[in-house]
């Protein structure tokens, strides 16, 4: 028996969602001199790059892009890797970016790492919010809120020419 994949968002719809999210981020941070986007390695980082491009086209804010890497299944099993200088986050607004918010484990541990520095503010951006949280975290910027059951899986593909979000 083959699994059916339901297309949730196509490439055009993903671009629309990301554009709207970029405008929302700009609206909430337009008075800031600097904003740092931190993408969770993989599709979160890819999404952060896309948001960076969109934000720089609509905003005069200086925007930096960094990456954070952690073991998504066992976040405490290995040290979290950050591409920049963590001390440089002090007094800055940070937007943590990932593709899908499911249980919240990845985002809560990444947020915890970032909050070890005295940030001015921290916001969460995610393309899909599934509402299966086991951790107390909520996205500030969401492309799509999707009610699913625990057996279903949301797959995000952001490679050019194959962009789509599927429900497996």
Image (cartoon, rainbow, N blue to C red):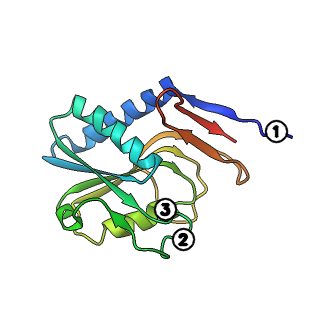
Does residue 139 lie above or below 105 as drawn?
above
Q: CA distance from mark 2 to mark 1?
A: 30 Å
Tally of numbered discs: 3
* Mark 2 or 1, nearer chain start: 1
The residue that mark 2 highlights is 74
Q: Dot 3 surroundings within 10 Å: few (below 14), some, or many (20 or more)?
A: many
Q: Are marks 3 and 1 in contact (CB under 8 Å)?
A: no
Residue 2 is marked as: 1
Instruction: Say which residue appears at 61% left-offset and 32% top-offset.
Output: 8
Does residue 28 lie above or below 9 as drawn?
below
Helix or strand or loop: what does disc 1 sit on? Answer: loop
The residue that mark 3 highlights is 106
Instruction: Say which residue appears at 36% left-offset and 66% top-offset.
Output: 81
Q: CA distance from mark 3 to mark 1?
A: 30 Å
> Residue pushed farthest bottom?
77
> Residue pushed farthest left?
33
Res 98 seen here = no
Tell me where residue 50 sits by quadrant: top left
């Amino acid at each position: 028996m083959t699994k059916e994949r339901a297309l949730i968002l196509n490439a055009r719809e993903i671009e629309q969602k990301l554009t709207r999210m970029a405008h929302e981020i700009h609206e909430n941070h337009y008075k800031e001199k600097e904003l740092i986007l931190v993408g969770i390695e993989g599709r979160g980082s890819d999404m952060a790059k896309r948001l960076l491009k969109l934000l720089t086209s609509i905003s005069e804010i200086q925007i930096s892009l960094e990456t954070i890497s952690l073991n998504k299944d066992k976040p405490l099993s290995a040290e979290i890797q950050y591409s920049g200088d963590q001390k440089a986050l002090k007094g800055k607004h940070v937007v943590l970016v990932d593709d899908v918010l499911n249980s919240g484990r990845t985002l809560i541990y990444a947020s915890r790492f970032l909050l070890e520095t005295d940030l001015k503010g921290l916001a969460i951006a995610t393309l899909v919010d599934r509402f299966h949280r086991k951790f107390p975290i909520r996205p500030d910027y969401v492309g799509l809120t999707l009610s699913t059951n625990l057996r279903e899986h949301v797959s995000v593909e952001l490679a050019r020419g194959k962009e789509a979000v599927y429900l497996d």
